[in-house]
Image (tube, rainbow, N blue to C red):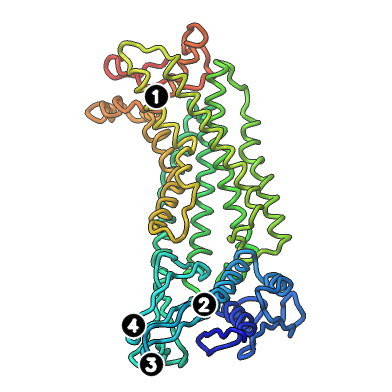
Amino acid sequence: MEMLCRDRYGSFPLSVFKVWSCTMCYSYLFRDSMELRADMPKPQLVAINGSRYPPGTVFYPDIQNTTIARAVCNSLDDFNCGRWTSCCRRAVECCEEQNHDPPPSFEEDEYCPRTWDGFGCFKDTRRSGVAVINCPTYIEHSNPAADATKICTENATWFRDPASKQEWTDYTNCVLMQNFMTLYKVGVACNAISLILLLPSCVIFMAFRQLRVQHRIQLHTCLFASFIFTNGVMICWDSLVYKDRLEKPLEESVMHINTVGCRILYTASRYAWTCNFVWMFLEAFHLYRLIVHAFKVPKSLKLYFIGGWVSPLIPVVSYAIIRGVRKDGSCWVHHAGGFEWLIYTPNLLCIMANFFFLGSILWILLTQLQSHPNEPSSYRRALKATFILVPLFGIQLVLVIYRPPQDWTGSFGYEILVKVVSNTQGAIVALIFCFLNGEVHSNIGGVIPMTMKRGPLRADIVASNSMSTQCTTDVARTHQVRNGGGSLTDNKANYIALSTIDKDTPNGMYNRK
């Protein structure tokens, strides 16, 4: 005799239940927003106008029939296909559990029967009790660490919704929209803070000729520009697409409509992030090259500019073409499987290379840099270099490379960490390499009227010779050590600008070397 399986609408033979439950999974998950519709009360899906299938085409969605399952998945992207198939498989597992689990030890009128409710599987539950399951991962925006509950009434029947008169389960705790809104606010705030600091930094770098002619400052400016581009694009994405999806029903959201502008904005965000990684790599490579090939400074940075702005187009354009050919929906935000490595690979290679460059630079600082009696030890200099170069090289991003399982209790805190670490990098490097940079202070101080230079403020400016200037001066001195001496000021194209504030100059005047 064929097994009977119960759901909220009654008990069905296994062969019927498999088709019925898959039909309902499709209907519950996508709410008539896809190319197929559940033809209630029949256990079938029907193609509508605009579908890739002729209107009226009928499918009986049995997950164990690979041909039918593939045909249904063709109406979905890979992400949603995975959600739907997971729901169908869980329904079949629930049916098997209903038939294989031993019967309850109490009387039939003392409990609510085991059942499949369309999303979850519930065991026999005593009357006036509450059945609890973990929130299914295939529910959109679900938090698997939260619980869904189903009430068994005093009459030993499952609670019914007063409006629909159907058995009802409380899944409201599974999707905490407030958490997603918090992530939106944190992301926009971090991006805005970075923009507020990055924009004036670029203006300062370009306003003073002594700064803008240096290769180091030109590279910093390009890196800052890539951060500005990324922060701006992410604010647009979060405000126009992400927030829209949180506030509107699925079928009305920009993400579901999958507009051309939405896909262009998503592609721009992938390009911006890739530019960030490449420019961080170029910063690290340039510094490492200067240490290894002392005083052999490149005459031009054209190759750097091409590498920083043009090379990211290769993987990003390839990725966009593939997503377009696949006709992926949802603004391409869902995972594209192996094709994602077109973007991941160059970014990871940049981070790996920067680890090598940082280690090599610190090793040289510790082993080959001669200490002056009045200067900090090599270890202190290495510590300063680490503090400065880690955000410049993007090493801190390794903290957010691995994404823990969704059912981890700290997943929301991790998402906050991702937002902060990723979106405040621009603000940190702007502070270190511009606003706290003694060389920048000396140039700005040169345009301040002399009357403003007298007094306590002047002393503060003199004392602010930055760690970034000191650290990179140490690197310049490393060139000297590795090449057997020579003045640090002999090469005007050196990595470090040497017209910094001299604390020993009488009357607080500048020492223009």
User: Is the residue under label 4 in contact with that under label 3 (CB below 8 Å)?
Assistant: no
In the image, residue 225 sits, relative to residue 5, either above or below, namely: above
Left/right placement of residue 217 relative to residue 304 reads left
Please name the residue that numbered disc 4 is placed on: 129
Q: Earlier in the sequence, mark 3 or mark 4?
A: 3
Q: What x and y, as percent, mark residue 411? A: 42, 57
Of 44 and 333, the residue lying toward us: 44
Q: Earlier in the sequence, mark 4 or mark 1?
A: 4
Mark 2 or mark 3: which is in front? Answer: 2
User: Is the residue under label 3 in contact with that under label 2 (CB below 8 Å)?
Assistant: no
Identify the amino acid type marked 4: Gly
The local crowd at label 1, few if under 14, some if 14 to 19, many if 20 or more residues have their Cα within 10 Å, is: many
Q: Earlier in the sequence, mark 1 or mark 2?
A: 2
Tell me the residue at 39%/62% (across/down).
182
Identify the mark at residue 382; answer none if there is no mark: 1
Mark 3 and mark 1: span between their CA atoms?
75 Å
Q: What x and y, as percent, mark residue 18? A: 62, 80
Could you say whether the residue bearing mark 2 is in a helix, strand or loop?
helix
Identify the mark at residue 100; answer none if there is no mark: 2
Q: Is residue 224 visible?
A: yes
Tell me the residue at 49%/60% (across/down).
238
State the image quarter where residue 132 is shown: bottom left
The local crowd at label 2, few if under 14, some if 14 to 19, many if 20 or more residues have their Cα within 10 Å, is: few
Identify the amino acid type marked 1: Ala
